[in-house]
Amino acid sequence: GENVEQHPSTLSVQEGDSAVIKCTYSDSASNYFPWYKQELGKRPQLIIDIRSNVGEKKDQRIAVTLNKTAKHFSLHITETQPEDSAVYFCPHWLTGGGNKLTFGTGTQLKVEL
Amino acid sequence: EAGVVQSPRYKIIEKKQPVAFWCNPISGHNTLYWYRQNLGQGPELLIRYENEEAVDDSQLPKDRFSAERLKGVDSTLKIQPAELGDSAVYLCASSSPHSGANVLTFGAGSRLTVL
C-alpha cells in the first residue's frame, strides 16, 4: 500500500515565488528520501535526495528538509522559473524489501509568468 | 555514457496483437526495473531484475506479460495479447550499488497505444 502521502496534488505559483511540496511517511525505518522531477513527456529524473542522518540538503535553488520526529520531508524551490513546471514525486524507498522505489501520483507544479 | 536506452519510443497496435519493448541499461548497472506509467499517474513497478534473476515480479500480470534478461544486461518486456488497458508508457530504469543502489536512472520510455 501507499506509505508516503504527498501534498498538494497541484500547485500554481507566480514566477519568482517559492514552492513547497511536502511528503509524509509512516515507516519509521525509512532512511532515504528522494525527489524526482518529470517534465511533460519526459522521463523521471532524480533532482535531490537526503538520508536520515541529515536534516537539510541544498542544491542551488532546490532544497530538501527532513523532520524525522514528525515523519515528513519537504521539497523547497526558490525563485521559481517556468522550467520548474513539472510533476514532482517523492517515491518511497522500501527498506528491508530489496531495492524498490514506489511512486505515488505526485504534485503537478505550474509556474506562471 | 549513453544512459538507459529503450526502443521503440512509440508503438501503436490493435488489441490482441503482441508487442515487445527492449531496454539496454547503463553499462555496469546490475539492477534493472520495468515500470508502467498511466496518464496522470506515477510509475508503477512491474518487475525488478538483479543481474539475470527476476527478484520481484509480484506486480507483473503474468497471464499476458512476460520479461527476460537472459545475460544480465539488456532486457525485453512482452505483452501478448495486448488489451486496450495496456496503453501506457513503459519505463525502464537501472541502478548500481556503485552509483547508489537506490538512485534510479530512467530511460525515455516506450509509449504504447492499443486501439
Image (spheres, helix red, strand yellow):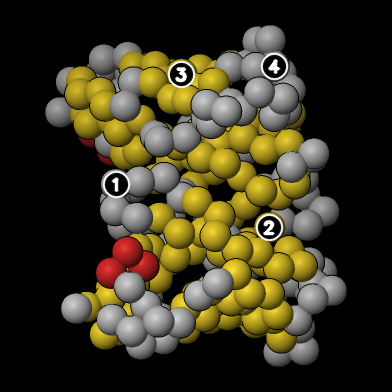
Label 1 to label 4: alpha-carbon separation: 29 Å
Near-viewer residue (B14 or B63): B14
Label 3 to label 2: alpha-carbon separation: 26 Å
Verify CB contact (< 8 Å) between mark 1 and mark 3: no
**What residue did someone put label 4 on?**
B72
Mark 1 belongs to which amino acid? Gly
What subunit carries mark 4?
A: B
Label 4 to label 3: alpha-carbon separation: 13 Å
Count of marks placed on residues: 4
**What residue did someone put label 3 on?**
B22
Disc 2 packing (10 Å; few <14; some 14–19; many ≥20): many
Can you say whether A80 is above or below B8 in the image? below
**What residue did someone put label 1 on?**
A41
Q: Inspect this view and state whether residue B57 appears.
A: no
Label 1 to label 3: alpha-carbon separation: 19 Å
**What residue did someone put label 2 on?**
A93
What subunit carries mark 1?
A: A
